[in-house]
Amino acid sequence: MQFVVNNEEVTTNAAESTPLLYVLRNELGLRAVKYGCGTGHCGACTVLVDGRPENSCEFLVSLVEGCRVTTLEGLSNVELHPVQQAFIEEQAAQCGYCTTGLIMRLVSLLDTTPRPLIAEVHSALDRHLCRCGSHSRVLKVVDRLFSAELGGVTTSS
Ligand code: FES
Ligand code: FES
């Protein structure tokens, strides 16, 4: 199977039923993609497939044939992506295990819905678990990224 990861063409001989996560981490060495629950419930493994956020732990590698996959490693070259920068400025990570998945989710939201409703923000974040309880800081990230678009209403109010 051939597909593009972070703007580079890759080929894998993995079985078609292999989760994309295993190919990304174990074959391609992209360790920003995290294995959390492995059952599609925590969001730690989120990557973009043709711009859409997907749980790579349950997304079969056969489904990405010909697609473009983006992981955290592919977000920036010299300068950080604005979502990464916002996480740093708000110190929104503790252990960091959930962070890359959250970043990829918010990158997708920023790309597809630059003026989201608060309900859309909550719906996006609902798919991500954080065992460290960093949620309030993540909401500050959201405020930093979207507050103007949210009409001045903050997610934390
Ligand atoms: S590891 Fe994929 S959703 Fe939890
Ligand atoms: S910062 Fe530790 S799981 Fe979210």
Image: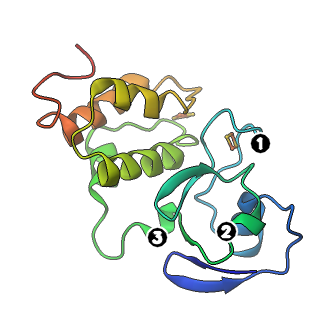
Quarter occupied by the N terminus: bottom right
Residue drawn at x 21%, y 38% is 146
Q: Quadrant of residue 123?
A: top left
**Label 3 crowding class (10 Å Cα cut-off): few <14, some 14-19, many 20+?**
some
The label number, if any, that marks residue 38 in the structure image:
1
**Circle 3 residue:** 74
Q: Which mark is residue 64?
A: 2
Give the residue furthest to the top: 157
Rendered location of residue 142, percent (x, y): 29, 35
Q: How is the image coloured?
A: rainbow
Q: Which amino acid, mark 3?
A: Gly
The residue at the point 59 percent across, 26 percent down is 131
Q: CA distance from mark 1 to mark 3?
A: 22 Å
Q: Amino acid at mark 2?
A: Val
Q: Amino acid at mark 1?
A: Gly
Quadrant for residue 49, please give it. Answer: bottom right
Give left or right: position of 76 versus 89.
right
Label 2, label 1: how far apart the Cα atoms are: 18 Å
Q: Quadrant of residue 30?
A: bottom right
